[in-house]
Image: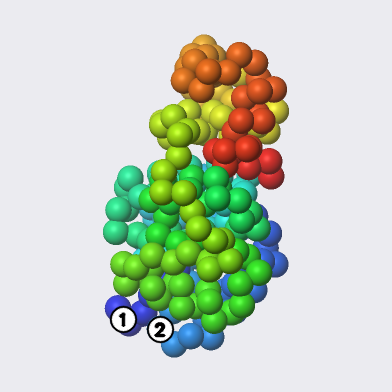
Amino acid sequence: MPESKISVLLVDDHGLVRRGFRRMLEDEPDIFVAGEAGDGQEAVDKALELHPAVVVMDFALPSMNGAVAARRILKALPATAVLILSMHSEPSYVRTCLDAGARGYLLKNAVDLELVEAVRKVAAGGQVLDPRLGRLPSSRKVPELTTRELEVLQLIVHGKSNREIATVLGVSANTVAVHRANLMQTLGIHNTAELVVYAIRNGLASIT
């Protein structure tokens, strides 16, 4: 494969959506799709395997959302550009992704040309924000959470118990309980229902 081509990893939990994006991108002579993933963990694994120039990723993914996956990918592959495609236009979701290191955020109803040009721009080191997003706040008052805490929070939002979360993350239930307690203490929240509402309202987790 010519080195001048931009390699892309497509991440979306809907196969038809990935197929549409693949066709859109592979019509371009300077872009090729190196692989696909259907959830956040698979995205991390595939990125580490393929070292794509750009990861085009949905925000709302099963188990691990796009922002958490972006953090994990960029920790290992800081030169990779992450471009988020999402149905969510709320500033909190956008800010969460940018804070995670994403170089771009497009709404999913963007026309074909916008996605292609966005991939080229983030691959070249630029930043892309969908013009329909409006003005974003320069910073948030949301306390900083670790990547692991965000993973636990996402699974709490999905209604998982400490034991179920422990199984997914490969840790002990006691460790999950500590993370849950730390989350509540850091965010000043006293029960799980409030924690779920806070996470969704502030774009820290998705309900997909």
Give the residue number, with chain letter if any, for mark 2: 30
Looking at the rendered image, the quarter that the N terminus falls into is bottom left
Q: x, y percentage for residue 69?
A: 47, 46
Residue in view at x 61 percent, y 30 percent:
198
Specify whether residue 74 is in view.
Answer: yes
Precedes in sequence: disc 2 or disc 1: 1
14, above or below 91, in the image: below
Q: Amino acid at mark 2?
A: Asp
Q: x, y percentage for residue 196?
A: 65, 29
| Res. 110 image quadrant | bottom right
Q: Nearer the viewer, residue 106 or 180?
A: 106
Specify whether residue 45 is in view.
Answer: no
Tell me: 2 left or right of 66. Answer: left
Q: Secondary structure at mark 1?
A: loop
Give the residue number, with chain letter if any, for mark 1: 4
Q: Nearer the viewer, residue 38 or 115?
A: 115
Query: How crowded is the residue under tag 2: few (<14 C-alpha within 10 Å), some, or many (20+)?
Result: some
Looking at the image, do the residues carrying marks 2 and 1 touch, with CB atoms under 8 Å apart?
yes
Q: Amino acid at mark 1?
A: Ser
